[in-house]
Structures are given as structure tokens and as C-alpha cells.
Image (spheres, rainbow, N blue to C red):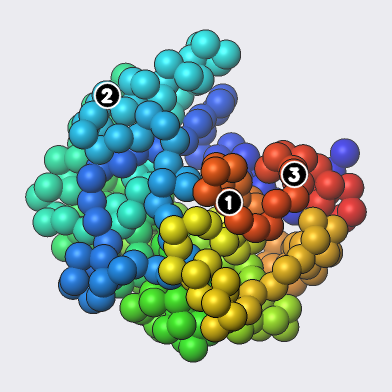
């Protein structure tokens, strides 16, 4: 059956033959809006441990994390190859020389065939982009994934992102001009945003040279400042049922430029951290439901 949208597997198949799996890495880096460079406290919704696999411990080092991640997948897929995914916090928030050491260590691991670097749009200096361009020009797969979250500056200010949508546009264009594939991360249901605002963010995304997008529902997590603001009644957020969110995702698919690959629509935080929404669905179950609806 024909897939109703282009997905991440379609994107990867244009760059690799056979199975390729992302391995998340915690390089022990912080964020500019945590370490005082831009602000303190971080994004109001963020509890970083909610999306770090158990093997991702910065004190273990890059090579050890890769080996532990490979142990998990190699049992089922002995011929699997890997993309080192610098996921935790801001994957470019260090001196360029240090970053290149970390990336080189990852690429030296057996079976690692490329890099995906998660970062903020205000944390991609030209010097680092030049280094990544050289890597890519030499045949190494490199992709940069920017956390944008929303195209609405009022929302970005409200959640303490400490950057603007124009900053995202600039970073995406500079990265694409360097010949490097670009991913974008967006959150549906941020405080103050209704469905029309979410769809306007999709329209804004369509205007950029983006290859891959990740959507997910806003999750209220224990320990996050946003969860406390909602509990006190200071802010309100969307309270979709799973079916209502499926309907929204269908509208997003129809609105999105069809050449952009969609990596995901939902995220799944650990049960002991998650306050809401609690849909009781695994990610693949949600995706199956969405594809059936489409």
C-alpha cells in the first residue's frame, strides 16, 4: 500500500542501502539558555532526561555510549549500521575544536556511517558550519536538526526559547547552502497556540529548504516549569484526545510540502515523568492509527 506521506525511511533510503539506525549520544554539553549565555532555566517545557535513552550518560564518553547502543540493536539486526545522533541539550554548544573531536570520535566507531547533530538555530557559527561542510564534501553523511518549536515569536518568548523564528530561517538557509541536509523540530500544542497558529507554522516551514521534520505533541512533565504554570492556572495548553490529535496531524500532512519527510508525530516520555497527555499508545500505534485515518 502506498504510504500517505514521505517518511524518514524514505529520506534515509536516498543516502544509504540497508538498515541504518540513529544512536543517541549525550556529549555532556549544555544549552545557551541554561548556562547563562542567553538565559537561565532552559525551555519551560523541557526535562531533558525524558528523551535520553538509558545508555546515554555523558560520563561514559562517546565511544562507550555508541557501543552500548549497538549492543541493543545488533542482537536483532547484526548488519545494522548507525548514525551518531548528538541529541542531548545543544549538540554544538562548545568550542569548534572540541566539537570536532567529539564528532570524529563518533565517526571512528565501527559501523557508524554518519552524524546527526541536534542543536539550536542560534548555535551554529559559520566556522563550525564550514567544518561540517568539509566533512560532507569528503563523503561523510552529516545532517543538522534544529529545534525551532514554533514560527511564532510570542510563543518562543513565552517558553523561554531565547531565539526568534528569523534566527531559525537564517540557520536553515545557511546549512542548506552548505550542502547539508536540514531537519526541523516542532511542538504542537504550545501555550497560546490554536490549530490555525500550528498550521501557519507549517506554512512557514514550507518556505524553507528543509528535508526532514519532527512533530510531537506538547507533553507536561513533572519538574518542568511549564507544568507548574499550568497547574497554577497561569497558562493553558491544548488538551487533545488521541483521536483529536490524529485529526490535527492529518491536516498537517495535507498542508505540508510533500517532499519534506516526516520523521514522527508523537513523542513518548517515561511514565514516571509524564503528567499529560496519557493516551496509552506506543509511537508506532499512533502512527498506524494516523495512516489508517489518512
Count how many numbered circles sit on residues in the image.
Answer: 3
Q: Quadrant of residue 190?
A: bottom right
What x and y, as percent, mark residue 107?
28, 32
Evaluate whether residue 163 shows in this view: yes
- Tell me what residue is drawn at x 59 percent, y 59 percent: 219
What x and y, as percent, mark residue 232?
55, 77
| Mark found first going from the N terminus, 3 or 2 | 2
Q: Which residue sits furthest front?
A: 232
Residue marked by disc 3: 280
Q: Quadrant of residue 272?
A: top right
Disc 1 is placed on an element classified as strand
Q: Nearer the viewer, mark 3 or mark 2?
A: 3
What x and y, as percent, mark residue 181?
44, 55
Relative to residue 234, is residue 144 drawn left or right? left
Residue 282 versus residue 263 in the image, above or below: above
Disc 3 is placed on an element classified as loop
Q: Disc 3 and disc 2: Cα gap in Å?
A: 33 Å
Q: Residues within 10 Å of mark 3 (few under 14, many from 20)?
A: few
Q: Disc 2 and disc 1: Cα gap in Å?
A: 29 Å
For the N terminus, give its image quadrant: top right
Evaluate whether residue 92 shows in this view: no
Which residue occupies the foreground of this view, 22 or 35? 35
Q: Quadrant of residue 141?
A: top left
| Mark found first going from the N terminus, 1 or 3 | 1
- Tell me what residue is drawn at x 38 percent, y 29 percent: 55
Disc 2 is placed on an element classified as helix
Residue marked by disc 2: 64
Amino acid at each position: 500500500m502506498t504510504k500517505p506521506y514521505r517518511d524518514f525511511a524514505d529520506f534515509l533510503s536516498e543516502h544509504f542501502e540497508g538498515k541504518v539506525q540513529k544512536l543517541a549520544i549525550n556529549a555532556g554539553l549544555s544549552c545557551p539558555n541554561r548556562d547563562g549565555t542567553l538565559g537561565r532555566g532552559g525551555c519551560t517545557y523541557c526535562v531533558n532526561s525524558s528523551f535520553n535513552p538509558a545508555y546515554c550518560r555523558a560520563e561514559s564518553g562517546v565511544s562507550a555510549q555508541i557501543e552500548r547502543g549497538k549492543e541493543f540493536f545488533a542482537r536483532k539486526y547484526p548488519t545494522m549500521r548507525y548514525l551518531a545522533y548528538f541529541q542531548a541539550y545543544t549538540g554544538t554548544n562548545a568550542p569548534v575544536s572540541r566539537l570536532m573531536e567529539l564528532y570524529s570520535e563518533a565517526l571512528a566507531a565501527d559501523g557508524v556511517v554518519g552524524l546527526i547533530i541536534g542543536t539550536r538555530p542560534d548555535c551554529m557559527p559559520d566556522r563550525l558550519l564550514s567544518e561540517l561542510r568539509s566533512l560532507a564534501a569528503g563523503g561523510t553523511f552529516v545532517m543538522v536538526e534544529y529545534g525551532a518549536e514554533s514560527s511564532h515569536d510570542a510563543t518562543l518568548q513565552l517558553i523561554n526559547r531565547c531565539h526568534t523564528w528569523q534566527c531559525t530561517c537564517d540557520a536553515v538557509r545557511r546549512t542548506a547552502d552548505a550542502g547539508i541536509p536540514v531537519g526541523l523540530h516542532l511542538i504542537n500544542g504550545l501555550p497560546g497556540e490554536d490549530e490555525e497558529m500550528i498550521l501557519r507554522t507549517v506554512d512557514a516551514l514550507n518556505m524553507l529548504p528543509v528535508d526532514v521534520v519532527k512533530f510531537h505533541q506538547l507533553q507536561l512533565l513533572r519538574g518542568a516549569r511549564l507544568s507548574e504554570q499550568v497547574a497554577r492556572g497561569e497558562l493553558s495548553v491544548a488538551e487533545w484526545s488521541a483521536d483529536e490529535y490524529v485529526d490535527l496531524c492529518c491536516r498537517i500532512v495535507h498542508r505540508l510540502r510533500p517532499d519534506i519527510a516526516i520523521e514522527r508525530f508523537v513523542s513518548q516520555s517515561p511514565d514516571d515523568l509524564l503528567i499529560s497527555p496519557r493516551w496509552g499508545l506506543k509511537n508506532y500505534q499512533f502512527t498506524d492509527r494516523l495512516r489508517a485515518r489518512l
